[in-house]
Every structure is written in C-alpha cells, then in structure tokens.
Image (cartoon, rainbow, N blue to C red):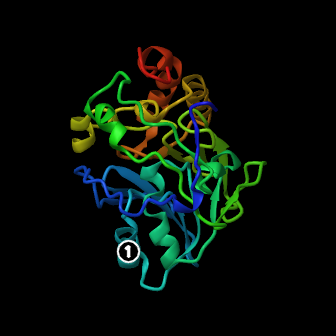
Amino acid sequence: MDQFQQNPNPTEQTMQGKYMPMTSVASGLLQQIAQDVYSYTVQIVNIAIIDLHDGFVLIDAGMPESGTTIISTIKDQFGEDRKPIAIILTHGHFDHIGGLEELLNHWDVPVYAHKLELPFLTGQINYPEPDGTVEGGLVAKLSPTFPHNGINLKGKVEALPDDGTIPVLQEWRYVHTPGHSPGHISLFRESDRTLIAGDAFVTVKQDSLYKVLVQKQELHGPPRYLTTDWQAAWDSVKELATLKPEVAITGHGLPMAGEELKTGLGKLAQNFGETEIPDYGKYV
C-alpha cells in the first residue's frame, strides 16, 4: 500500500471543478445490451443502467461534472419521475465517480462499493499518481494531468456484503476483481450471463488517443496508467473468463457480445502476461 497517499484534509476531497475536455465518437450513446440493462457513454467512459421498472440501479457515475448530463439523459429515456434505488461503484477512479456528487445532490440514494475501496471514497487515501512513464500511447503520456485524489462522500457510501450479494440486485452478484484498484468489482447475472466489468478489462486500447477517439473495438486489460497490481489484474481477467459471459459492458470501449467476447476474453486471459503487462512503468 506504499503507493497510496494519506490525505491530510479529507473534507476537501471533491471532483467539483475538475472537468476534462476528453470525448469520443460514442459520447452520448445509450444502448440496450441485455434485458433491462443499458450502457451509456459519458465522454470516454461507460456507465450502466439496470432498469427495475419501479426504479433503476446506476453502475458508476461518469466523468467529472457529468452529473447534470446523466440526470437529463435518464429523464429523457426513462421518464421524468424515475430515480435510482442505489448507485453501485465498480471502483473510485475519477472517470467512474466524477459526476457522483452532483447525482447525490439530486437523488438522495445509497452508494455501494467494495470495502477495500471505501478509504478512497471517504477522503482518507488518494489513489497513486497516474503513470505517465508506462509503456503506451498518448493518453498514457497525458495521464499525470488526471485527478487521482479520493473523494469524501460524507457517510453516503457503504460496503457491499462480503458474500458477493448486492442488496438492491437479487439476480446479480459481484466478483472482486482487483488489480486496477484494490476494491475493484465486476457485476454478473447468471441467468443471461451479462457482465458489467468496469475496468477489469476494456474493449478499446485505452492508452491510445486515436483508438479512444474512434472507439476501435479490441479487447485489452485495464488502463495501464492507473493499474498498480498487474498480477492481480491478470488473475481477475482469468476469473472473469471462467464466467463465459454472453455480453459485457466495460468501463471503456463499446459493448461486446457472443463468440467474439468469449473467445477474445479467453485469449486475453491466456496471453495477458505477454500482451497486456507493460514492459516498463512505475507499477510494473
């Protein structure tokens, strides 16, 4: 845990005022990828919406200062009076919790995350600085400018149960998939083998600016510049591959389904050490 920095001023941790002008051709795209499951792209990151008819569950919260856009999209697509039952975080990096404070100001709902992610969501610890020296493309080189502080949700976040259950999603379970962050989780529904993977793996080469902009679809491990434990990241991909998902929403890149997903994820798990772990970088 040496790379994690204690935060001396936890009450000051926020994503407000940290807007980042990064986007892709998929920004604003809302897609239904399974029964009652939707992927929504916010600039360069995806969130998931699970429609429960009497409400919905939001998975992750997009880029900094994207809360108003997320709220507007949900109202337009699902109805003016709809509100979430809860928000679940795959992890707490800036591009997955950026709009969270705005969302919680609008919707007073519980937030759930893995217990190992809570120190970053209660202002106690900052994430490691993004690694601009890691092997990779232009996004990796730009990454030291990305926010890496934790935020303080001031009592609005609670830990998920240790047994993999999700209090507000009876048909789903979570899988602890660390490596990209200590408390990273992925969500899986056995009945139709739907996977919400967060950044455990992605479907775009996230360190390449061109591929991010055009959303060129290809399977990769987690974004290199923020991944600090590569062995754990590899083990997480291996575990997700054993689930043999039929469709997946990842934190970055377009949704993927069918044989392309199952075969590609199997190959990723097998070849991860050769193709995904960088040759050099601070956390390699």
Q: Residue at x 48, y 17 (%)?
A: 271
* Image spot of residue 206 (x, y percent): 34, 36
Number of marks drawn = 1
Tell which residue pokes out farthest to the right in this image. 163
In terms of depth relative to the viewer, which is nearer, 239 or 89? 89
- Residue drawn at (60%, 73%) of the image: 109
Residue assigned mark 1: 77
Residue 227 point in image, percent of width and height: 49, 32
User: Residue extending furthest front?
Assistant: 8
Side (left or right) of 39 relative to 6: left
Task: Identify the element where label 1 is drawn.
Answer: helix
Query: Furthest-bottom residue in view?
Result: 81
Task: State left or right for residue 142 relative to residue 190.
Answer: left
Residue positioned 25% across, 54% down in the render: 21
95 vs 172, nearest the viewer: 95
Label 1 CA crowd tier, 10 Å (few <14, some 14–19, many 20+) = few
Residue 276 in view (yes/no): yes
Q: Amino acid at mark 1?
A: Gln
- Looking at the rendering, in which quadrant would you find the N terminus? top right
Q: Nearer the viewer, residue 240 or 18?
A: 18
196 lies above or below 200: below
Q: Residue at x 61, y 36 (%)?
A: 178
